[in-house]
Image (tube, rainbow, N blue to C red):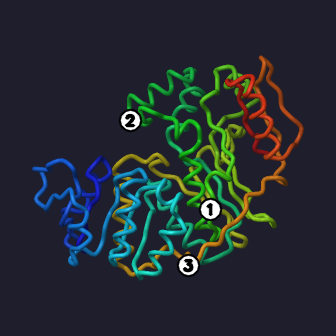
C-alpha cells in the first residue's frame, strides 16, 4: 500500500510513526505547507501531484475542516484512490456524496477514527448490522464533556475550573464550543446511526443540548438524589423514521451506562457495549484506528462498510417520553413524562429570558 498523507498534525504524526516500521505499507508523500526535514518521503504543497501519481493507491486525510478537505477527498476518490479520513465534520456534511463516489469509482472509503476513535466502534456497528437488525445506539461520545462532568461531580470543581483543567491537559480545544454545546457528539451520532440503520440523517434535524450552562447547584441537586450526569447520545428506530437526540442525562450511581462508553442493541443479539481509550481518544488511539482502516482496505473490505445506498430519514422524537430536570429562575424541578421534542421546545423558550438555564433528561 502506497499512501499519501494529507496533513501532518498530531494525528498525522501518530499514524506516520505507527506505519513507518511496517513492511506492508509506505507513506510516500505528505501534503504539507511547511518543510518537514524530519521526514524522508516527498513533501508537497500541491495536491495535484498526489492526485496524478498512479503509484499512490490510498489517501489519508487528517487535515480536518471542510475546505480544502472536501475537494481533496472527492478528487482522490474520482482518481481511483482509496480514502481514509478521521474527519467527522466532512463525513456528516457530505455523507451521501462521498459514499456514492466510493461505490461509483469502486474504491474504499473508511472513517473509523471519526467517531469513538479509541475503540473499533463504527466497524463494529457495520459487523453488527450484517448479523442483525440494529434497533438502537446509545452512549457517551465526547471525552471533553465527560472529563468536565467527572471533575464537577467527583472533585467539586465549578464548570469554568473544570473546563480550564481539560484545556490545560489537552482534553479540550481552545474554543470548546463543538464539545460543550454537544455539536461534536451529535456528528458522531449521525455517523453511527447512518451505519447502524442504513440511513442518511441531517445533522441539523437532531436536537442537542450541551453542558455549558451546568452549575455546581445542579451537581449538588443530582448528588442529593443519587444521580450522575453524563452527556448522552441516543438514536433508535421508530415507525416514522429515527428518534435521535443528544442531552445531559441523569443516571443512578450504579447504572452500567456511566462506565461503558457506547453500545448498540440488536433485535435478536441484544446489547453490545464498548469502552476503551475514550471517545475523545488522543492521538495514538485515533492514529491506530486510521491504521486499522488501512488494514481493512488491504483485506478487501466493502467500498463503504456495509452501506450501499443510504436513504434519507426523518427525525421523530414525538413519542419518546421522559421526565426532565429543569433549573430556571432559581428553581429546580422534575417534570412529569413529556416527549423529547416538547422538552427541547421548553428549554429554548426559557433560555430566551434566562440564557443560563439548564436541562437534563432522566434515564428511567
Is the residue under label 3 in contact with that under label 1 (CB below 8 Å)?
no
Which SS class for mark 2? loop
Q: Name the residue under label 2.
A: 170
Residue 1 location, quadrant: bottom left
Horizontal arrangement in the rendering, residue 34 relative to residue 177 (left or right): left
> Which sits in the foreground, 317 or 105?
105
> Which sits in the foreground, 101 or 234?
101
Which SS class for mark 1? helix
Horizontal arrangement in the rendering, residue 49 relative to residue 230 (left or right): left
Q: State the image coordinates of residue 271 (x, y, percent, origin top left).
A: 66, 62
From the image, state whether disc 1 or disc 2 is nearer to you. Answer: 1
Residue found farthest to the right:
336
Label 2 environment density (alpha carbons within 10 Å; few <14, some 14–19, many ≥20): few
Instruction: Please tell me which residue is depicted at 41% across the width and 32% down the height of the picture.
Output: 174
Q: State the image coordinates of residue 52 (x, y, percent, origin top left).
A: 23, 73
Q: The C terminus is located in which quarter?
A: top right
Query: Label 1, label 2: how many angstroms apart (C-alpha)?
Result: 28 Å
Q: Mark 1 points at which residue?
A: 193
Instruction: Please tell me which residue is depicted at 34% across the width and 70% down the height of the picture.
Output: 76
Label 1 environment density (alpha carbons within 10 Å; few <14, some 14–19, many ≥20): many
> Does label 1 or label 3 sit earlier along the sequence?
1
Residue 287 vertical placement versus 48 (above, below): above
The image's mark for residue 308 is 3
Residue 236 location, quadrant: bottom right
Q: State the image coordinates of residue 119 (x, y, percent, origin top left).
A: 47, 57
Label 3 environment density (alpha carbons within 10 Å; few <14, some 14–19, many ≥20): some
> Does label 3 or label 2 sit earlier along the sequence?
2
Residue 331 vertical placement versus 32 (above, below): above
Horizontal arrangement in the rendering, residue 315 relative to residue 216 (left or right): right
From the image, state whether disc 3 or disc 2 is nearer to you. Answer: 3
Query: Label 3, label 2: how many angstroms apart (C-alpha)?
Result: 38 Å
Amino acid at each position: 500500500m502506497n499512501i499519501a498523507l494529507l496533513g501532518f498534525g498530531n494525528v498525522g504524526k501518530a499514524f506516520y510513526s505507527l506505519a513507518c516500521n511496517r513492511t506492508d505499507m509506505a507513506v510516500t508523500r505528505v501534503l504539507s505547507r511547511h518543510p518537514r526535514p524530519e521526514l524522508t518521503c516527498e513533501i508537497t504543497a500541491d495536491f495535484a501531484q498526489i492526485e496524478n501519481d498512479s503509484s499512490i493507491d490510498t489517501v489519508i486525510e487528517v487535515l480536518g475542516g471542510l475546505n480544502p478537505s472536501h475537494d481533496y477527498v472527492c478528487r482522490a476518490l474520482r482518481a481511483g484512490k482509496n480514502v481514509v479520513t478521521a474527519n467527522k465534520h466532512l463525513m456528516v456534511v457530505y455523507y451521501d456524496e462521498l459514499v456514492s463516489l466510493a461505490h461509483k469509482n469502486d474504491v474504499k472509503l473508511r472513517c473509523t477514527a471519526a467517531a469513538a476513535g479509541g475503540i473499533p466502534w463504527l466497524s463494529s456497528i457495520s459487523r453488527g448490522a450484517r448479523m442483525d437488525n440494529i434497533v438502537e445506539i446509545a452512549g457517551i461520545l465526547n471525552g471533553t464533556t465527560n472529563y468536565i462532568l467527572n471533575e464537577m461531580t467527583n472533585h467539586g470543581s465549578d464548570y469554568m475550573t473544570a473546563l480550564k483543567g481539560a484545556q490545560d491537559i489537552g482534553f479540550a480545544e481552545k474554543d470548546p464550543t463543538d464539545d460543550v454545546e454537544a455539536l461534536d457528539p451529535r456528528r458522531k451520532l449521525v455517523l453511527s446511526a447512518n451505519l447502524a440503520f442504513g440511513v442518511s440523517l441531517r445533522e441539523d434535524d437532531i436536537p442537542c443540548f450541551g453542558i455549558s450552562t451546568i452549575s455546581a447547584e445542579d451537581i449538588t441537586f443530582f448528588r442529593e438524589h443519587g444521580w450522575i450526569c453524563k452527556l448522552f447520545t441516543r438514536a433508535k428506530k421508530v415507525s416514522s423514521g429515527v428518534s435521535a437526540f443528544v442531552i445531559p442525562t441523569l443516571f443512578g450511581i450504579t447504572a452500567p451506562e456511566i462506565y461503558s462508553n457506547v453500545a448498540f442493541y440488536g433485535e435478536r443479539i441484544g446489547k453490545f457495549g464498548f469502552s476503551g481509550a475514550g471517545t475523545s481518544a488522543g492521538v495514538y488511539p485515533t492514529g491506530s484506528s486510521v491504521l486499522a482502516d488501512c488494514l481493512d482496505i488491504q483485506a478487501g473490505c466493502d467500498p463503504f462498510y456495509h452501506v450501499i445506498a443510504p436513504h434519507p430519514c426523518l427525525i421523530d422524537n414525538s413519542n419518546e417520553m421522559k421526565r426532565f430536570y429543569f433549573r430556571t429562575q432559581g428553581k429546580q424541578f422534575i417534570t412529569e413524562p413529556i416527549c423529547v421534542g416538547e422538552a427541547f421546545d421548553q428549554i429554548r423558550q426559557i433560555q430566551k429570558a434566562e440564557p443560563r438555564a439548564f436541562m437534563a433528561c432522566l434515564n428511567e
